Amino acid sequence: MEGKIKYQFSAKMWQHQATGGWYFVSLPKTFSKEIRGNLKWQEQGWGRMKAFAEIDQLKWETAIWFDTKLDTYILPIKAAIRKKRNLEIHQTMEITLFI
């Protein structure tokens, strides 16, 4: 995995309220505060930051976005990832994130 900083946490998956809304997990606010405080300069448009994620030994290249309403970064969970690991909304999962 690329990325120099490793974060591990548990989070519940949720779905955005829009029709056909995307699925996400929210990073713990303590991690988001640390990431934003030290690495905000790496953000691209809309608070996007490249990252690598791992759930249940499935790794993929992705990005996190800073959500100003939630005051934390959110990690999208693509349909392919959800299907491969049978992930469901409100399910708590262990996530490893590399920034």
Image: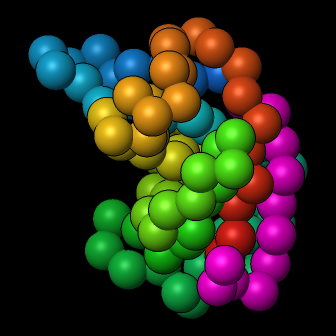
Q: x and y percent of residue 87 in the render? A: 52, 21
| Magenta extent | 1-11
Residue 5, above or below 42 = above
Q: Is residue 32 visible?
A: no
Q: x and y percent of residue 88 in the render? A: 50, 14
Q: x and y percent of residue 54 in the render? A: 65, 54
Which of 68/81 is in front? 81
Instruction: Find the residue positioned furthest to the left.
Output: 19
Please name the colour scheme applied to the rendered image. rainbow
Residue 1, above or below 19 = below
Residue 72, above or below 39 = above
The quadrant of the picture occupied by the C terminus is: bottom right
Residue 1, above or below 6 = below
> Residue at 56% across / 89% down in the picture?
41
Q: Is residue 96 left or right of residue 23?
A: right
Q: Is residue 3 magenta?
A: yes
Which of 44/58 is in front? 58
> Residue at 33% across / 40% down in the picture?
80
